[in-house]
Image (spheres, rainbow, N blue to C red):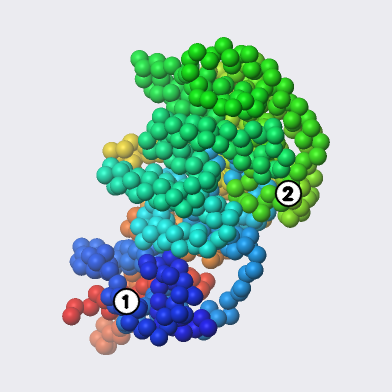
Amino acid sequence: MLEPVWEKGCPRVGEEGAVGWGVELDRLDDIDSVEKKDASLDNDWEDDILADTKHRPFAETWLDVELGREKRHWAPWTNLEEPPEDVERTVGFDFICGFLVEFSRQETKFRLLLSVLSLLGVKGVDKEFSSLKRSAAMERYFAADKLQNQNFHNQLNVLQDTIPTVRTSETLAIFIHNVFAQSYSKFPEPYRTNAILMWLEFEAGVIRQNKGGAAKELKKDLKKLIRCLLKEDRTNLDLVVKFAELEFENEGYNSAYSILVTAITASNSNFLKQSTEQGFLSATLLFRAAVELELREMVKIQKDNLEDPDLQKSDTIHRNRLQWLLVHIGCGKKFSAYSTDKSDLILALVEGALRSFNEWIMEDIQKISCSRIFEMAPFVRHSVGDVIFFHAWLTKFCSGTQDALCMVESVRNQINVDEEGGRFNQLELTKSFLVESLDKICLDMLWFDSIFDVIEKNRLRNFYHYCISHHSSSSYFQNMLVQVQDTTSIVSPIWQEVLNSIQNKKKTNLALIEEACEISLAKFLRVLDPNNPQDIPALGYCLLYKLSNLLERCVSKPFLKNNPLIWRLLLWCVSIESLRKDSKIGAENIKVMLYRAIQDVPWCKALYMDAALYLSRIGELTQTQKNIVHNSEDEDQQQEQKIEYIQGSMEHVNELMVEKEIRVRLPLQELEVLLEPL
C-alpha cells in the first residue's frame, strides 16, 4: 500500500507539506496534488567556487565542493522532474520495502522518534537545579551511551564541520522543526506532551544561536507557538512550566514569575494529601518550577554584581519568596503570593514544613515506588526526588548548607542500588536515578554557594570528584567539569580521575575525557594572538603536548581507540605542529597519523577530509603530475622519452576513501568535466 504513495513523490515527514501516508492514500488519484519542484537544486554556492578556479589550485576546489556537498546534500532527492546528477541520492521503494516495520507500543514509537532526533543532533540538556533528563540510568535504558561523537556539540570551532548541524544548516533546522510539528499530534498522552517539550527546547536552542533581529523574530514565533499549543490543552501544567522557563530566558524574571504564581494560585494542590505517584508529581510540578526560578534569578543577580561591583543589587526578595514557596508546600496551606508583611510568618511555618517533609521521606524511602516511570524517559521524575529537593533547600536557607548535605546523604545511604541490574529492571533504574538526582541536588547547592563565596570552590571540587567517581556515565556531571575545574594540572584530583579512568575499562568515562579535551583546547585558544593566530607561543605548544599525551593514552586502550573524536583531535594536534616544520615533513606526519586513525575508524569520512584540509593549509594537497624523463646512452641516438607519474596527495586521499568504501560525492573526473570550458 505504501508503494504508490512513495513512487508518487509526495512530501514525506520532515518535508514541507507532508500530511501523512493515510491522507495521501485517500487522494491517490489526484495526481495534480503534488506540486512539482524546480529540478535544479540551488547550486549557486558551487557555481561560485567553480567560477573562481583560476585563482585557486585544483585540489582546493575539489576540497571545497566535496565538503559543501557533504554538508548540504544530506537528504534524499524526492519529487523532482529530472533525476539528480548524484544517483545515490535517489531512494526507490525497492530499497526501503525490506525495512518497513509496524510498531504497536506507543513507548516504542516514541523511542524511535528519540533515536531519529538524536541522529539529527537534537540532544537533551540538563540545567542547574532542574530534574535530570539525561541521567546515567536513562542512558543505560536507551543504550545511548554507545553513541560516538565526531565533533564537539558547543561552538568550539576547532574541528571543521563535515556533516550538517543546526548551527550551520538552516535546511536541517527546518527539517527538524517539521518533524516535530508533523509528529507530536500522532502520540497519545503523556508522549504527546514529551514531544512538545522537546520541540520547544529545540526551538529555544535555535534562538540561542541567533542574534539581533533574527533572534527577536524567532522569539515572537516561539511565543505564538506556545500559546497555540496551550489553547489545545489549557490544563497542561508541563506546558505552563516550559512557557515560564522560556519566558525567563527570553523576557526576564518578572514575566516568568507572573505565569507560575498565577498557575499555582489556580491549582493549589496539596501534595501531602496525594495517594498516587502521578498525583504527587502533579502537585509538586509548579512549586518546583517556581523554586528553580528563584534560584536561577539569585545566581543571575550575583553574576551581574560580580561583573559590575557598583551595581550591588539585592536578592533578598527572591530568598524570601523561595522560602515562602517551600514552607507552603511543606505545610499544605493554601498558597497566596508573597508580600513583605509575611516575612514573620515564614519563621512560624518553617518547623512544621521541615517536620512534614522529613516524615514523608522516612515513610516513602523504605519502599520506593517505580510505577514504570522510565517509560516516560527522558522526562523522568520521582516524588522522592522532588520532596528531598524541597527539604534540602529549605534546610539550607534555615540552618546552613552542611545540615542540608547531611540530610540528603542520610537518605541517599538508605537506597541500595544493584549496579549489575539489567537495562529493563524498572526498580533498579529508579533507585539509580534517585541516587544520581540526590547527588545532583548536593552538587547544585555547593555550586550555588561557590558563586557567592569563592572559598566554597574547594568543597565543590571535592564533592565533584566524588560524583564523577560514582556516576562515571552521568551527562550532567560530565558537563559540569568546565564550571567546576578549569585547570589541567596533574595535582588536581579531578584531572587525576580523568587520567585514571583511561586505565580502567569499567571506569572509562569517554564524555568526561571529551570535556577535559575541551578545557585544554579552550586554554590553547586563549594564549593565541587574535591578530596573528599562526604565531603559537611556547605555552601554546606546552598545552598542545599535554593534550596529545592524553589522546595518545586513550588510543592505546582497546575500549577507547574506536572513538572518532579522539582521532580527529590527534590529527589536529599533528597539523598544528606541522606549521613550524618543513612542509614535506609536516605532510608525512599528517599522512602517518591518518593511516593510524583509519586502522581503527575507517568509516569516519571526517578524518579523510581533515587530512585534506591540513595538507592544503601547508600547501601539500597536490595533484598528480606527469614528469617526462629522457633516457639515452648515446647522444647521437634518438632520445627515448619515458613518462613518470608523481602521485598527488589529493588523489591519494581519494583512493583511500574508495578503498575503505567511503562515499566520494565529487569524483575527480567529474570535477575535471565541470571545469572544462564550454
Where residue 48 sits, quadrant-wise, is bottom left
Residue 61: give x, y in percent of width and height: 29, 66
Amino acid, disc 1? Glu
Q: Which mark is residue 35?
A: 1
Left or right: 626, with 453 as reference point? left
SS for dot 2: loop
For the residue pair 97 and 551, the one nearer the viewer reads as 97
Q: CA distance from mark 2 to mark 1?
A: 49 Å
Identity of the residue drawn at 40% across and 67% down: 15
Q: Nearer the viewer, residue 385 or 139?
A: 385
User: Which residue in the structure is indicated by mark 2?
Assistant: 371
Decide if residue 623 is on the left or right side of residue 108. Answer: left
Spot occupied by residue 490 in the image (x, y as percentages of width and height): 60, 32
Drawn side of residue 492 relative to residue 585, left or right = right
Residue 122 on image: x %, y %: 49, 54
Q: Amino acid at mark 2?
A: Ser
Look at 56% across and 18% down and name the residue there: 455
- Picture coordinates of residue 621 (x, y %)? 36, 63
Can residue 508 be seen in the rendering of this structure? no
Residue 314 in sight in this render: yes
